[in-house]
Amino acid sequence: MRQRLTILATALVAAVLTLTGGCKSNEQTAQAPPPEQPAASAAAQPDTPPPAETKTEATPAAQSAKTAAAPAHNYTKELIAAAKAREKAPDTYKVKFDTTRGVFTVTVTRAWAPLGADRFYSLVKHHFYDNAAFFRVVPQFVVQFGISPTPSVSAAWKHTDIKDDPVTQTNKRGALVFATAGPNTRTTQVFINLKDNTRLDGMGFAPFGIVDGNGMNVVEMMYEGYGDSAGPDQDQLEKQGDPYLKKGWPKLDYIKSAALVP
């Protein structure tokens, strides 16, 4: 260890009690634990109906132009409604993440952490993670995401805590785990372990999935320049949404879409 054992023990105990996680906030927000050695979207718009179909036969070029011009589906209403729902996930399922650094997939195994797997399934199914930032990247520790770019969606999901799952798997490199602000406070934030963080096992962090194949090559490319001390304030991110990030942390990477694999 780079510090004396007594100093490290004191720092770890303090970190567990305060659960600051390195991201500044005035309120209790979901965090992953701090590393072993701490390092020094626009508001939602109403759904817009698609343009009326014409009965004339379109050329391939015209069809392409029409597709390009069609507005993206707005999932805000569905996400807000889904916050009150409880869905059971399949025994196993895959999720494809299309990000600003490339594509990777994850496999979720419900038996590992049933409550976490169910919650993640519901979030992905209703496109919660689309356009969300990897807002906390701590080198050789974790990549964290799961705050909506839309404040109304964050507000709807803020108090949807689920109980903790028993830890049945280790926090190895590539494992997906819900962040927490304390016992039984998991909501929407998830982190991916960048290395074997087995010390988190005893702190109650229950992995529910794993990054597939060479997907960690993509995960490890997420912008890490802001570290753990100069990142965004989670409370302000929830309240202000993506414009807050774009203004203060423009180099962050994003999830373009996160979708269930058929």
Image: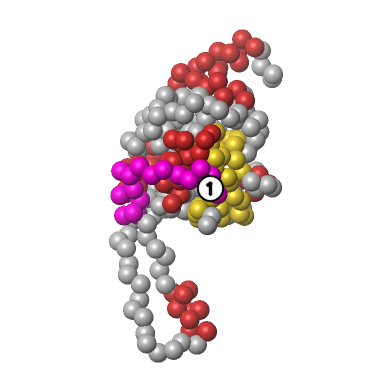
Q: Is residue 49 above or below residue 171?
A: below
On the image, the x and y values in percent for residue 211 come to 61, 43
Q: Nearer the viewer, residue 251 or 211?
A: 211
SS at mark 1 in the image: strand
Q: Is residue 227 visible?
A: no
Q: How is the image coloured?
A: secondary structure
Boundaries of the magenta span: 76-94
Q: Is residue 255 above or below residue 33?
A: below
Examine the image and state in which quarter residue 50 appears: bottom left
- Which residue is found at the position 33% from the left and 44% from the top? 85
Within 10 Å of the Cα at label 1, are there few (<14), some (14-19), or many (20+) other Cα atoms? some
Name the side, left or right, on which 55 lies relative to 135: left
As for residue 85 lying within the magenta part, the answer is yes
As for residue 55 lying within the magenta part, the answer is no
Name the kind of residue labelled 1 in the image: Tyr
Q: Is residue 171 visible?
A: yes
Q: Nearer the viewer, residue 9 or 72?
A: 72
Q: Residue furthest front?
A: 91
- Which residue is found at the position 65% from the left and 30% from the top? 196
Q: Nearer the viewer, residue 9 or 90?
A: 90
On the image, the x and y values in percent for residue 143 come to 57, 39
Name the side, left or right, on which 126 lies relative to 137: left
- Which residue is found at the position 65% from the left and 35% from the top? 173
Tag 1 residue:
93
On the image, the x and y values in percent for residue 47 come to 32, 63
